[in-house]
Amino acid sequence: MSDNNRLRIAMQKSGRLSKESQELLAQCGVKINLQEQRLLAYAENMPIDILRVRDDDIPGLIFDGVVDLGIIGENVLEEEELSRTAAGEQVNYQMLRRLDFGGCRLSLALPRDLAYQGVQDLQNCRIATSYPQLLKRYMSQQGVRFKSCLLNGSVEVAPRAGLADAICDLVSSGATLEANGLREVEVIYRSKACLIQRAAPLSAEKQALVDRLLTRIQGVSQARE
Ligand code: PRP
Ligand code: ZN
Ligand code: MG
């Protein structure tokens, strides 16, 4: 276990948010020597430890209070929150700030040659997704029944593989849909990266450090505007 007086920040190890999460800390003056295979990294000039994990694990680490801060996509955060709430658990955390990166949308997509007039056309279809809760919420708001097919990766091959009629997945450039002969038909959720803090209070020293980081993040984002 690392020193408990050090602020623990969880960020994505490899994926869409990794590079900009690292850059954000660098812009805040946090000096970290990140080696590719290291899951734990230490800041040289501040009492901060960086935990590099799968993005999907970050909301739970914050909800359970085992790390202090997390940089995560709102889509993953909200999915995990809905999932825990559905399981009857209480979810607590603090939203510190929406960040200027990691923009993407969660969309429904169909094989390109399939006709589509509106979401009612998906009545009783099977939809492959890694975001069953966000999809369920949207479809029940629309009053459309569907069957779900949970896949944590390779969602875009599901229609071709005969696993599902449609998919609900993240779209950023649209290249993945294009490459798989799929057409985006509805945007159901828009997401950006955000910075969250565990609900349980931090020590005064740690909280002062968080406040300093936040001030720097604000400065960086104002300078960009
Ligand atoms: C998402 C999604 C697609 C890809 C879409 O995965 O599952 O594979 O991005 O991006 P594009 O529209 O630019 O082609 P992502 O890597 O974000 O999530 P994951 O690694 O957590 O599965
Ligand atoms: Zn992921
Ligand atoms: Mg993916």
Image (cartoon, grey):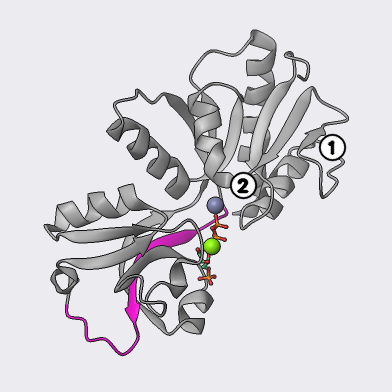
The correct choice, above or below, for 14 with respect to 46 in the image is below
Q: Which residue of the protein is positioned furthest toward the top in this rendering?
A: 204
Image quadrant holding the N terminus, namely top right
Q: What range is drawn magenta here?
A: 101-117
Name the residue that disc number 1 marks. Answer: 31
Tally of marks: 2
Image quadrant holding the C terminus, namely bottom right
Left or right of 185 in this view: 155:
right
Left or right of 133 in this view: 199:
right
Q: Which amino acid does label 1 sit on?
A: Lys
Mark closer to the chain start, 2 or 1: 1
Image x and y of residue 178, in percent: 47, 82
Q: Which residue is drawn at 77% across and 43% down?
A: 26
Left or right of 219 in this view: 59:
left
Let me know if residue 8 is in the magenta part.
no
Q: In which quarter of the image is residue 114?
A: bottom left
Q: Can residue 194 be spotted in the picture?
A: no
- Nearer to me, 41 or 96: 41
Q: Can residue 84 be spotted in the picture?
A: yes
Image x and y of residue 107, in percent: 36, 65
Image x and y of residue 206, in percent: 67, 16
Q: Measure the alpha-carbon separation of dots 2 and 1.
A: 19 Å
Task: Assign ligand 3 to one image quadrant.
Answer: bottom right
Q: Residues within 10 Å of mark 2 (few under 14, many from 20)?
A: few
Q: How crowded is mark 1: few (under 14 residues within 10 Å), some or many (20 or more)?
A: some
Name the residue that disc number 2 marks. Answer: 221
